[in-house]
Amino acid sequence: MNLVDLVTSQLTGDVLGKLGGLVGTNEAQTRSATSAAVPALLSAFSKLASTNSGASQLASSLGGLDLKMLGNLAGLLGGGQASSLGNIGGSLLSSLLGNNLGGIVNTLASFLGMQPGISKTLLTYLAPVVLGTIANQFKGAKPDASGLMKLFSEQQDNIRSAMPRGLSLADFDTTASSPRRADDHHGGVHRHEEPASAFPSWLPLLLLPLIGLVAYMMWPKPAPAPQQVVVAETREVKGPIEIDRTAVIEREGKKVEGVVEETIKLAPGMEEALKVGTDLTGLFGNLSKVLGDVKDEDTARAAIPTLNGYAPMLEAIQKSTAALPEAGRTSIVETVTKGLGALQGVIDTVMAIPGVKEILGPVVTPMIETISKLGK
């Protein structure tokens, strides 16, 4: 059994595509990023589980996961629960890794050549998947500290070998674990006890102020930011992407004409637009399926309750679309145009069946009119 393989086996092309849509990367970029992020998270959790207190904290978090919900990963990422999954992941990472989370995010972002914000978003969506896989190894039993310590001890080589070249386990040393002797056993069997020190326990306390002063003096100070002369700063929005450009002609007294620094990120409101677009695409698919099953007057009448059931979803999409910025609404227009084109063909076919138009027309026509208004 290999924990890394168990996690990555869940990241199918469909899942990576939906994850990339949430994060803001294409499928190839998402696949490359997850190949580093998964062992990174496992390494961080392994370090946490190397102490009794850390393992107990991790066990407590695992016990609160809804494993049944996490079993439908593609559905979670592609539906309205995607934001909930991200919130769960963010909460878990903050509680388990605390201040160390920033270091992991920045190290991973630097290695992957992406913005820290994108790196953090990726980790928040992956964290529940990784933790759910760990919890599943206990086969329905409640995870405990000793079981987690044993599991990660067995998985060290797998995690280490999965780490991409250039990304070191040392970068994720999130806890300071005490060294354990080879003859140290857990539970029931004797532990080797180190001999008591000959020095009074209070003696090191007298040295703390001196140690602190020396550490402060020796601690590397951050290098001053390079002085540079900026020619112009511009911002360009290309659909869902926002590009900030800074043109520099001089840095630290040396000319660097032609150098342009770029920062690429999702435009404001585009994350919400992606969610609305996903919901809208799902609605088109549901309507096409229900209408495609109509063959006569009886099946038309049977379809009415299901069609009426989509009214709240359409109303929520209306409200969300109205709250989007202009760039976000533009992307919804494209989704509506493509979706209606395919759906209209299904509607025309169904309405041509004798007697069906009189039954379904009063239900379907208002829905299509409402959807059409989203595309204007």
Image (cartoon, helix red, strand yellow):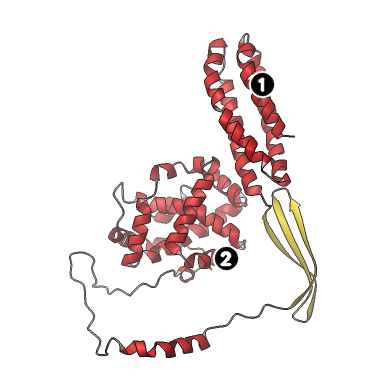
Judge by depth and name the residue closer to the eye, 376 or 105. Answer: 376
Label 1 Cα neighbours within 10 Å, binned few <14 / some 14-19 / many ≥20:
few
Residue 200 at x, y = what percent?
27, 89
Residue 256 as seen in the image, left or right of residue 97 = right
Q: Which residue is mark 2?
A: 111
Q: Which residue is mark 1?
A: 365
Q: CA distance from mark 2 to mark 1?
A: 52 Å
**Residue 176 appears anywhere in the view:** yes
Disc 1 element? helix
Residue 118 as seen in the image, left or right of residue 141 = right
Q: Image point 46% across, 71% down: which residue?
A: 170
Residue 96 at x, y = what percent?
42, 61
- Which amino acid lies under the numbered mark 1 shown in the image of this protein? Thr
- Which amino acid lies under the numbered mark 2 shown in the image of this protein? Phe
Residue 194 at x, y = what percent?
24, 80
Disc 2 element? helix
